[in-house]
Amino acid sequence: MALKALVAFGSRDALIGFEVFLGRPAVDPSLMVIGLNHRTAPVAVRERFWISESRRLEALQELVQAEGVEEVIVLATCNRTEFLLWASDPGLAANSVLRLLSSQYGLKLCEWKHFYRLLDEKALLHIFQVTSSLDSMVLGEPQIVSQVKGAWQQAQKVGSTGRFLDAVLQKALTVSKRVRNETAIGNSAVSVPRAAVELARQVLGTLENKRVLVLGAGKMSELSARYLVSQGARSVCLINRTYEHAVELAKNLGGSAAPFEERWQHMAEVDIVISSTSCPHTVLNCDEAVAIMTKRGKRPLVVVDVALPRDIDPSVREVEGIFLYDLDDLEKVVQHNAGEREAAALEAQKIVEEEARGFRRKLLAEYVVPTIVALRSRLDEICRQELESFKQECGPFSKDEDALLGDVAGRITRRIAGSLARELKEVPEKTEQEQMTVAVQRLFHLEKAEKALAGTSI
């Protein structure tokens, strides 16, 4: 009986632990997800483990060569940091991720509780849910699809992904498309810009004739600016570290642009600030905020920080007259307005679970292919040996008789192999399937193929 042991990673408070089996000659490859998101960690923790694009490349290159890891994709957004792994040994792979997080990001023991570890069917279901926007802060938001695609493409460029994760991600995107086509999950989604506007209205009452400053020229900045204009904002000024990018976006939106160094001057004049830069440091600290409010007098300033890591020092919240909101505050607004999409989410969840079950069966069937191929080869060998022995004892036979005997032997081989193949492929649980596969290998003296799925297709 194999001994079960929990990997020394995380705590009972995390979403799920996973088990590895000790006492076996080998650990079978597994799909695994390790990560944290807006459900398990506040923004202060998420920003500590957010991985920038350049560091993502380094992480991919390091992990794909690490113990237990065959393939890896890193998904990093403002709401999640996740490692998608095809692991030859889940325990070793988890420890490799732990070493990376500890050495590069200073992971502490008390922070493990924020991470979840999902294995096999739970990992597959999670990937499908994430890509279908069922695990997003904004239920039904479309940005996650492009983010997943981007993470996948980055891994492909580095060479850290292969046929297994490629197959999983391709299927996840197909499932996401089906969810959007067959449900209303994306209808009336409370987007981050919309949530930001609701918070601004709570302070200012109306957006009519309000002046807006948008820091950053990325997708979130563009979406925020467009929505604010549609809600009555009088003018929008865009500021970015690369001035040319701000000018280009301003032209598209009918707004103005200003150099990054002038951000404090404009903050003293506008009513709303939306900040979504990729700066490695804060763009507004407490002392700067005090100076800005001194110039503004008693006019309130709404500052919405949608960046990760955060653009605005949290201490700015203490400055009188400034109403600072971050991603955690936006999530509260989003959850408050999520009721109207719950029915669509239930429909979407059924689709995701159905697709995950089907794809899981396909993966399980793939696992036994090498054993089935080896079994057929072994049975062919046995039949050939016995047939030759029979011919020598009872022959000679005519050409037609030889052909008939060969045909009968082939049918016997196919009948036995086909029956065993169906049984192995239709076993619903991986552990039981592994046990049956090992039993077949022992009974027929088959060598366990280490290159389990080489030459097969998912």
Image: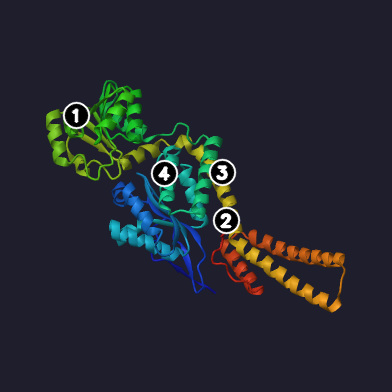
Instruction: Name the front one of labels 3 and 1.
Output: 1
Identify the residue position indicated by label 3 in the image.
351
Mark 4 neighbour class, 10 Å CA radius: few under 14, some 14 to 19, many 20 or more: some
At label 3, which amino acid type do we have? Answer: Ile
Q: How many labels does the image show?
A: 4
Q: In this view, does 401 lie to the left or right of 361?
A: right
Q: Earlier in the sequence, mark 3 or mark 1?
A: 1
Identify the residue position indicated by label 4 in the image.
150
Identify the residue position indicated by label 1 in the image.
266
At label 1, which amino acid type do we have? Answer: His
Disc 1 is placed on an element classified as helix
Disc 1 vs disc 4: Cβ atoms closer than 8 Å?
A: no
Identify the residue position indicated by label 2 in the image.
363
Q: Which of marks 2 and 1 is nearer the N terminus?
A: 1
Mark 2 neighbour class, 10 Å CA radius: few under 14, some 14 to 19, many 20 or more: many
Instruction: Name the front one of labels 3 and 2.
Output: 2
Disc 3 vs disc 1: Cβ atoms closer than 8 Å?
A: no
| Label 2 to label 1: alpha-carbon separation | 56 Å
Residue 215 in the image: x percent, y percent? 26, 34
The residue lying at 38 percent from left, 64 percent from top is 95
Disc 2 is placed on an element classified as helix
Q: Can residue 10 be seen in this view?
A: no
Where residue 146 sits, quadrant-wise, is: top left
